[in-house]
Image (cartoon, rainbow, N blue to C red):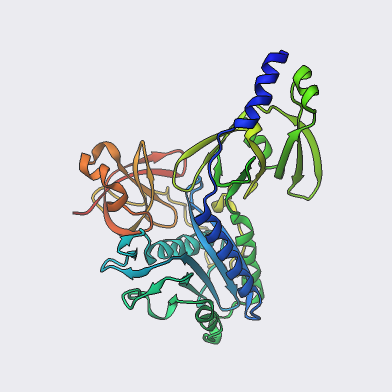
Amino acid sequence: MGWLTNYRWLKSLESQRLPDVDYGKRAATKAERKVAKALRQLPEVLDVHHALRLTQIEGGRSRREVDLIALLEDRIVLIEIKLFKGAISMDDHGILHQDGTSRGWSFAKLDDATKRLTDTMGLTGIDLQKTEVHSVLLFQGKGVVDESVTVGKRLTRALVAKNVEDLKSFLQRPLEKESVMDSERLNAVKSFFSYCGTWDQITLNNGVKREGDLKIGSQVDAWRPLYRSLRWSNQRGWFGTLFRGPLFMAKSKGWDGKKSQFEVDPFSEIALLAPNGKLETHRLDHIESVEFGYSTLPNWSSIVLLEPKAVPAPDVKKPPKKQAEGPPYAKNDIIENATVSGIHEEHGIFFTLDAKNSGLYLKRKMQMHEWTMRGALYTVGNSMDVKVIGIRKKGKKGWNIEVKPVE
């Protein structure tokens, strides 16, 4: 670059247009970490995970995030934390409201997370047996929770906690001895959580932190498996940059703790897919640091964390001939309580049908008003019955399943 270009770049650093601080998100994260710290002090709690990533069983980046997951010997507890002010209520459909305005949250989101958790564990060989998975809605802040806010029909395995003390009492309530995991199963569950990871995060030059999934690209793909975090800065002073251009050096820390340093292009870009589905693009000279939430996406179908117990072999001379595996469903089958797992702006509505299969309600087959109201009609985490209207082979093992809601 010439000195004039370098000068313009130096001046641009003074007028970078960066997102403002999201004080609500910052306060919520602070509250979550405070609760996690309090729970870790309980002798019954073995570990607490913050913003854990529960990916789709068949792979991909769709995820269900849970604020906190507490692991005990006899249960796993999924905790959603709401930092609300004002009057807090729940409508007849179980949707949470603040001062009369819907916040779009219900226990169905934790139900979906529970299903995703137990189904995925099952693929790795972990059968929780009598160990329970509990759901907790915890309120922090100065909001007033009225009597309409309940757990619905979930009864003993769910709780609305109005403060941390309510939550502590719930966790300290003893369960049956049959619920306690043996050491082998407990270690397998701990290993499972270590695979999950969390959000990626970038910190901009004004200190604003943005969370999401760093999108696939040659640069990100090369960095992710090697580095847990990257921090870069211009190594040349003002005059050195003016005449020679910037020298951006990245200081990295690997997943193994080892540190290194290498040069990066300050004008290259990385994209972040935010939790709300919005894609943000930032140049490296606008970013102070990057932290990866996971090194690789787990392929749950190939991970074995708990081997099945040995059973006597059947007394036969020849094993039966293996039959070709057919489709999991037939056309016109009704799948009850399929879970809305995602909304794709180009393709349509994705449903989780079972532990291994997803279905798609195609956008092009939806009515215009139906697509316009998709956020309300197909809230992620909600369940509904769907009908199989098409199925075809995908690769060697998978199936493309087309569905539509049952009217």
**What is the x, y in percent for residue 160?**
42, 75
Q: Nearer the viewer, residue 79 or 77?
A: 79
**What is the x, y in percent for residue 203?**
63, 44
Residue at 47 percent across and 52 percent down: it is 322
Location of the C terminus by quadrant is bottom left
Residue at 50 percent across and 61 percent down: it is 66
Q: How many marks?
A: 0
Quadrant in the rendering for residue 3: top right
Quadrant in the rendering for residue 172: bottom right
Q: Residue furthest left?
A: 407
Viewer can see residue 350 = yes
Q: Nearer the viewer, residue 276 or 365?
A: 276
Tell me: 284 left or right of 135.
right
Quadrant in the rendering for residue 95: bottom left
In this picture, is 96 found above or below 346? below
Tell me: 401 left or right of 198.
left
Q: Nearer the viewer, residue 254 or 373?
A: 373
Residue at 63 percent across and 49 percent down: it is 294
**What is the x, y in percent for residue 65?**
50, 57
